[in-house]
Amino acid sequence: MLNLTYDKMFKSFLLKGENKSFLIHLIHGITKIPLKSLQNIKIQNTEHIIYYKNQKIMKSDIIVSTCDTIINLEMNRKKYEGLFERNIEYLEKISVTKNALIREYGKGKKIIQINFNNFHMENTKPCISKYHYKSYIGKHILTKIREIYLVDLEMIKNMCYNKPEVNLLERQCLLMKAETKEEALKLIKESEIMEKAVNTLLALNDDPEILLYYDEDEEREKVTRARITTARNEGERFGISKGKKLGLAKGISLVASNLLKENIDIELISKTTGLSIKDIRSLQMSK
């Protein structure tokens, strides 16, 4: 099964030395950064600073840098409430880590985040959307050293379904959605960049560690769903039996506490319980 939307496959694929040109052209196609400026990109550490005890280790998928720009690439396989808030938090953590030694605000490296979304984003028309921090009225840009791009892989796949000719960027995105060897091979079209990329993908697909990761990832999701259901049921029972004295809020807090004990992502806990991420972190720090 070919699937670049799994984070380990995504990272292994894009960080292969033979795919450097693929990565450079992918970033160029999305951000319009000149190819010349991307020739000497360097791989950066993806682990973020931990600020308090028991905080879960946070890692970005891929971080590369040029002389004046840091680029974070994230693969979002599934949509959930709080997803983009999490990604923005990654963006700011990168800024804190990489620009820690600057002597003057506004003089640090430009931070760009590219989100590849394996789902269709409602209420968006372009396949690639660009965002800044800016005012709602007048569209005044607050800072020019932050850019976020959302790449709608599902929309690109649908758009190119009956399209007679697709450009390089579209083929690169379609490769991320390819599920069979035949689909991948059709995307080469006399392109050396795509030929190397497809060969790399097919080789990774035969890697036992990658195949094992698929199984582990699916199993992890099943276990997570089971833990969420168990924790939610326990919280609901507690809330019903103690509701008159402690109220529904106490039951919801218990659900959140149970999920934290199971090391469930904070964003997922927020989605499950309706509690804010801030409240969940306060609950986490009180333990």
Image (tube, rainbow, N blue to C red):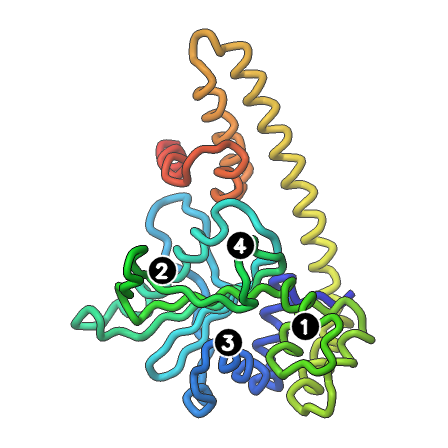
CA gap between label 1 and label 4 equals: 22 Å
Look at mark 4 in the image and give the residue it sits on. Answer: 123
Residue 242 appears left or right of 223: left
Q: Which mark is residue 1?
A: none
Residue beneath the point at 60% across and 62% down = 7
**Between discs 3 and 2, the one toward the N terminus:** 3
Work out which quarter of the rendered image holds the N terminus and state it: bottom right
User: Looking at the picture, how far across and down is residue 182, in whole percent?
Assistant: 82, 75
Q: Are marks 3 and 2 in contact (CB under 8 Å)?
A: no
Binning the other alpha carbons within 10 Å of mark 4 as few (below 14), some (14 to 19) or many (20 upward) gives: few
Query: Which of label 1 and label 2 is nearer to you?
Result: 1
Q: Which residue position is annotated with label 1? A: 174
SS for callout 4:
loop
Name the N-terminal-most of marks 1 and 2: 2
Q: Amino acid at mark 2?
A: Lys
What amino acid is labelled 4 in the image? Asn
Q: Which mark is residue 30?
A: 3
Q: Nearer the viewer, residue 129 or 3?
A: 129
Q: Residues within 10 Å of mark 2 (few under 14, many from 20)?
A: some
Q: Are marks 1 and 2 in contact (CB under 8 Å)?
A: no
